[in-house]
Image (spheres, rainbow, N blue to C red):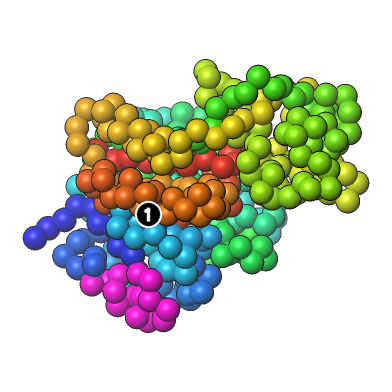
């Protein structure tokens, strides 16, 4: 029986065994696009090559992760895959941006490659064209890449996440049609045969506490509310300075509030000079709200249900990018089964991974973003 969109997952320890399991799940599908998300425990290049051999005419892209999931599986150390036929993705182009001669040169070369396949990116219809973006995480290029995409394709959305490495915090990889990079990004642009909706859920709400960023350099903030940043932040969240750790940071992110919705900025560490290191670019003078958790599982179900209603038809699949810090929260609150069940209850294939930051318009933290397909 012909199928149009399929998700697959393998928890096998051996890459060869995982490949066999994934290919068996994809049997019968003639894909135009295959995306895969793999633990660093596996040979990603071998996975990419096997998927390309299975579907020689398809575009194959992917990245490494901090955990993988589908609508039926949730875990770490595995591989998740989503494959689309031409009934969903009519045409597709992918390009690997590498930065040997600079980030701007690499991204613009990649957008030119996409344009050579699909047409002028400034003229493509955003109702039918949408993209995935997989960034490498450890060179902190994401903010600049999103800014460059905003200039090259101002009407188009690229949604995705930064590749992980199972929390080793050393190196991450992105894959594109047989090529691999540890300092680059993969842009995949699709012309769809079905409608789509972009989903975003942070599972936070604003408190009444406001923090104004003072001295800022990139992602580092040395002053908040006119005081040393570490002391001002610690006082705002009610945690002693000597007890500031990732648990405290994760439970107390800040948010740029837009139409009542937070665009999350998370502290990820304290620099030697006492500055706070955030997971996304900060802006001097910006006022951010201190955030608090809402219902992570309930919010996830609601955002997917609302997006399906907006589609005006049953959804046929979704690719989701869930922040690794949301994964930590899921684990800490023992919500793994409930989170997977929430995805499984949607009734359509889902594949995704836990990422080191999320991308849609800008680089985000502690958020789930994705694309829901009609």
* Side (left or right) of 109 relative to 304: right
Whether residue 119 is visible to the viewer of this picture, yes or no, is no
Dominant SS of magenta comes to: helix
Q: Quadrant of residue 24?
A: bottom left
Residue 4 part of the magenta-drawn span: no
Q: Residue 231 location, x and y as percent?
A: 85, 35
Q: Quadrant of residue 285?
A: top right
Instruction: Name the spot of residue 16 as percent of width and height, x first.
Output: 37, 81
> For this view, does 340 lie left or right of residue 62?
left
Q: Residue at x 44, y 50 (%)?
A: 335
Q: Quadrant of the C terminus?
A: top left
* Residue drawn at 28 percent across, 67 percent down: 55
Whether residue 66 is visible to the viewer of this picture, yes or no, is yes
Q: Nearer the viewer, residue 364 or 5?
A: 364
Residue 124: % across, % down = 39, 33
Residue 204 against residue 8 in the figure, above or below: above
Q: Between residues 7 and 93, which one lies in front from this camera angle?
A: 7
What percent of the width, then of the height, locates residue 158?
47, 40
Q: Which residues are magenta?
A: 10-24
Query: Residue 15: within the magenta?
Result: yes
From this viewpoint, which residue is outermost toward the left? 1
Q: Residue at x 83, y 38 (%)?
A: 230
Label 1: few (<14), some (14–19) or many (≥20) C-alpha neighbours in 10 Å:
few
Q: How many marks?
A: 1
Q: Return the residue at label 1.
A: 337
Kind of element beneath mark 1? helix
Residue 372 lies left or right of residue 220; in this view the side is left
Q: Measuring 51% from the left and 54% from the top, which residue is drawn there?
A: 331
């Amino acid at each position: 029986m012909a199928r149009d969109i399929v998700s697959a997952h393998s928890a096998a320890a051996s890459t060869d065994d995982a490949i066999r399991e994934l290919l068996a799940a994809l049997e019968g599908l003639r894909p135009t696009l295959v995306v895969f998300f793999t633990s660093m425990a596996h040979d990603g290049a071998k996975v990419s090559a096997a998927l390309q051999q299975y579907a020689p005419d398809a575009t194959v892209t992917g990245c490494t992760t901090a955990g993988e999931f589908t609508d039926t599986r949730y875990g770490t150390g595995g591989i998740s895959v989503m494959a689309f036929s031409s009934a969903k993705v009519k045409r597709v182009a992918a390009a690997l941006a590498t930065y040997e001669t600079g980030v701007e040169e690499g991204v613009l070369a990649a957008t030119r490659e996409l344009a050579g396949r699909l047409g002028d990116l400034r003229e493509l219809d955003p109702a039918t064209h949408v993209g995935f973006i997989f960034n490498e995480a450890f060179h902190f290029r994401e903010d600049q890449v999103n800014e460059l995409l905003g200039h090259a394709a101002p009407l188009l959305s690229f949604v995705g996440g930064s590749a992980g490495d199972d929390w080793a915090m050393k190196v991450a990889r992105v894959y594109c049609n047989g090529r691999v990079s540890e300092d680059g990004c993969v842009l995949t642009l699709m012309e769809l045969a079905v409608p789509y909706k972009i989903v975003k859920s942070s599972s936070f709400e604003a408190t009444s506490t406001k923090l104004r960023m003072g001295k800022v350099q990139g992602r580092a903030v040395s002053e908040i509310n006119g005081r040393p940043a570490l002391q001002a932040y610690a006082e705002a969240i009610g945690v002693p300075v000597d007890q500031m750790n990732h648990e405290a940071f994760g439970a107390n992110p800040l948010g740029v509030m837009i139409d009542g919705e937070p665009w999350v900025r998370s502290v990820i560490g304290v620099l030697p000079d006492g500055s706070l290191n955030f997971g996304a670019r900060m802006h001097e003078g910006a006022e951010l709200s201190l955030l608090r958790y809402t219902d992570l599982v309930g919010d996830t179900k609601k955002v997917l249900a609302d997006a399906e209603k907006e589609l005006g038809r049953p959804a046929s699949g979704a690719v989701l990018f869930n922040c690794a810090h949301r994964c930590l929260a899921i684990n800490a609150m023992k919500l793994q089964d409930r989170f997977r069940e929430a995805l499984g209850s949607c009734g359509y294939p889902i594949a995704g991974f836990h990422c080191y930051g999320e991308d849609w318009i800008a680089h985000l933290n502690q958020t789930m973003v994705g694309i829901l397909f009609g």
